[in-house]
Amino acid sequence: MQYRGLLAQYRALLNLPAHTRPITLLEGNTPLIPAPHLAHELGGGFELFIKYEGLNPTGSFKDRGMTAAISEAAGRGVTTVICASTGNTAASAAAYASRAGMKSIVLIPQGKVAAGKLAGAVAYGAQVVQIDGSFDDALAMVVEISNKHPIALVNSINPYRIEGQKTAAFEICDVLGQSPEWLCLPVGNAGNITAYWAGFRQYNDLKWCGLPRLLGVQAAGAAPLVLGHPVEKPETVATAIRIGKPARGEQALEAADESDGRIIAVSDEEILHMQKILAKLEGIWVEPASAAGLAGLAHQVVHEKLDLRGKRIVAICTGHGLKDPDIVTKGLHQPILVAPRLDALEQVILGEGKAT
Ligand code: F0G
């Protein structure tokens, strides 16, 4: 049977009002890819899977929440939606709003949004407004404006975003037959970790699939949940999670605590290293923020001697590498140039007759 999108798949488990009118791009149903080489690199003896959320229609996990939020808004006749975003929410909101025939307005922090995300928001037809400030400033502004005008807010403060994003937990349990022992994922505004925990708890109540321990990972320069206070000027190469005052921070801390897990911080170097080895060892290219969950796992193994033997781990890779190509090409020398002759090519790739 043809896959008809998340709302069709899991509607009975989602707390959405009766007026909801499904707007879908057939999001979700993303693959859970085994990562044996990376597991080996991290010491081996455990099973590692990547939930590759970059394969959603607009290239990030936001589409799960957006199908729910936009469908609810469409069902009550909303004509304009707004969000603050580090980029992925913007692209997703713009795509789903266009599909619903709505206008979308997206507020982004000036100069800190990766090229593929901004291009998406523009291509899908959003009105893009740069704020001379941070994501946190932009979020405060969209909250205020949506209280004042008939414009629907589609950030993850919107409860329907969480309903949609819960479905990733359902999919993991459906594929594995039970929850993994650990779930690692990046944490920015903290909607996603909140959604996963809600999803696993709901599925466990229904199907006794167990609960994972949550490893939420922030970037060291934007780690309010690790520091225990807001960060006024968050900084990280992982611009998606460059957030100093997470809207669902309390819930994220509760979820980590209830699951007997933790929220930790990793350096930009650890994030970029993980992004690189994931692509190199497994052929999975993700944007920097998306590598943070795995970087956190590696950090726990190396520095905290976390014992993973015999365990099953799922890492959520939230966005596609194509979202942020500049990170990879920035320090790159131009690829080598050869004359269009076979001998010239042989010289370069075989050297003195030997393949390297
Ligand atoms: N990974 C990526 C690729 C993201 O874009 C985000 C958040 C996160 C992880 C963190 O998820 O906020 O639910 O804790 N991006 C938001 C945005 C803030 O505007 O696109 P979270």
Image (tube, helix red, strand yellow):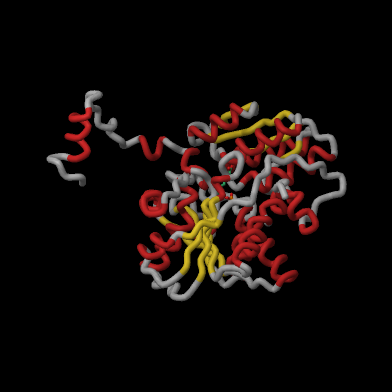
Evaluate whether residue 86 shows in this view. yes
Residue 66's image quarter? top right
Where residue 112 sits: x, y (%)? 49, 36
Relative placement, left or right, of 200 versus 313 is: right
Residue 253's image quarter? bottom right
Looking at this view, name the residue that lies furthest to the top.
340
Relative placement, left or right, of 110 versus 11 is: left
Q: Nearer the viewer, residue 192 or 329?
A: 329
Q: How many marks?
A: 0
Where residue 105 sits: x, y (%)? 67, 31
The residue depicted at 69 percent of the width and 36 percent of the height is 96
Q: Nearer the viewer, residue 222 or 233?
A: 222
Query: Measured along the vertical axis of the image, is residue 272 above or below residue 261?
Result: above
Where residue 119 sits: x, y (%)? 54, 29
Evaluate whether residue 250 shows in this view. no
The residue depicted at 66 percent of the width and 71 percent of the height is 209
Looking at this view, name the residue that lies furthest to the right.
18
Where residue 135 sits: x, y (%)? 57, 41
The residue depicted at 65 percent of the width and 63 percent of the height is 174
The residue depicted at 59 percent of the width and 66 percent of the height is 176
Relative placement, left or right, of 80 versus 270 is: right
Query: Measured along the vertical axis of the image, is residue 301 above or below residue 272?
Result: below
Relative placement, left or right, of 51 versus 306 is: right
Looking at this view, name the residue that lies furthest to the left.
352
Query: Measured along the vertical axis of the image, is residue 38 above or below residue 151?
Result: below
